[in-house]
Structures are given as C-alpha cells and as structure tokens.
Image (cartoon, helix red, strand yellow):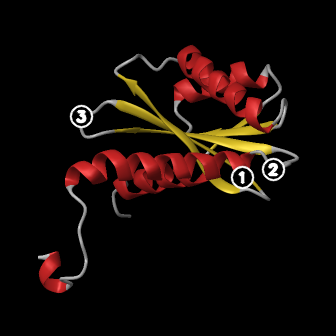
Amino acid sequence: MMNGANPVLTIPSAKKVGDELLTASFEQHTEKKYLVMQKDHAFVAVAFDGWSNLKREKMINVVASSPNMGVVHIKTIAVGFDSQTGKYIARLMIREISELEDVIGPGKVASCTTDSAGNMEKAWEILEKRGIFCNGCAAHTSNLLLQDVAKLDEV
C-alpha cells in the first residue's frame, strides 16, 4: 500500500524496525533524557502513575519535572502481579528517587505526586519521614469526585 502511495519510499522491514531502529531510538531518547536531567535544577518533582497493561499486569510510570526541565519520562516499571502494599510502593519510590538523585544531585527531589489510593498514602508516610513532600494528583481526585457525582440519582 505504501509503495503505491510513494514508490520512491522504502519501508523498513518489521525486523529492522523492532531491532535496529527501536534500539537506536531508545538510545537516542535515553541520551537526551540524561542530558536534560544533568543540567542544574534547584529542585525536581517526581510523579508515579500506576496502570495495567492488556494482560492486567501492573505497571508504574515514573516522570520527573522542574521549571527548567519540563516533563521527562524516566522509566516504566513492570510490577507484574506483586502485592502493592504501602511498604512495597515506598521501597520502589525510594529506589527510583535515589537513582534519579544519582544523576541530578542528592536532595534535589522535593516532592512526589501519586494517585490517592490507600497504598500510596501509606507510602507517603514513609517518604515524608525522609523529608520528601508527597501529595495526591488533583486531576485524579477531580475524576473520582465526578464519577461519584454521576452515580447520584437526579433530584
């Protein structure tokens, strides 16, 4: 189909896309990410967002942001089917924050944003003892509120 649209264009094979091109793109993205993060930032905020893939395995996206950096996707963690207790989440968050501070400098992570699930709130208690301010996502809270309002019977 693409050859009919533009016979001069050579489409790479699926193998080339999945191996060589994907690897090159990933390496280029990773290099840019670390160059952006290594600039001097007074502070950085980190957000952890949980979701499930098509196999219902739990995943967590980690993103960092600061006024001079914008938003940078750090990584996606495959949690799988592990029980996500507050302690488990706190250990995971502490590990990721430590790895980030190895790049940007110690003590530069000032806050941590998550959804407002019970296990996340338990993790906040542990992180706040380490001097990291934690908070829930306002958009997530608004979404939950609107879902509850939609369930109300009409008056």
Instruction: Give the Cα distance between marks 1 and 3.
Output: 33 Å
Q: Which image quarter holds the C terminus?
A: bottom left
Mark identifier at residue 88? none
Whole-percent x, y for residue 135 in the image:
68, 39
Mark identifier at residue 36? 1
- Left or right? Give the position of 48 relative to 55: right
| Residue indicated by mark 2 | 39
**SS assignment at label 1:** helix
Which tag is nearer the camera, tag 3 or tag 2?
A: 2
- Left or right? Give the position of 2 relative to 148: left
Whole-percent x, y for residue 77 in the image:
47, 31
Q: Which image quarter holds the N terminus?
A: bottom left
Q: Using the rendered view, name the quadrant where residue 74 is placed.
A: top right
Q: Amino acid at mark 3?
A: Lys
Q: Earlier in the sequence, mark 3 or mark 2?
A: 2
Number of labels in the image equals 3
Residue at 24% across, 34% down: 55
**SS assignment at label 3:** loop
**SS assignment at label 2:** loop
Q: Amino acid at mark 1?
A: Val
Residue at 73% across, 44% down: 45
Tags 1 and 2 touching, CB below 8 Å: yes
Instruction: Give the Cα distance between marks 3 and 2.
Output: 38 Å
Using the image, determine if residue 100 lies above or below residue 128: below
Whole-percent x, y for residue 113 in the image:
65, 41
Instruction: Give the Cα distance between marks 1 and 2.
Output: 6 Å
Foreground of the two, 85 or 92: 92
| Residue indicated by mark 3 | 55
Q: Amino acid at mark 2?
A: Lys
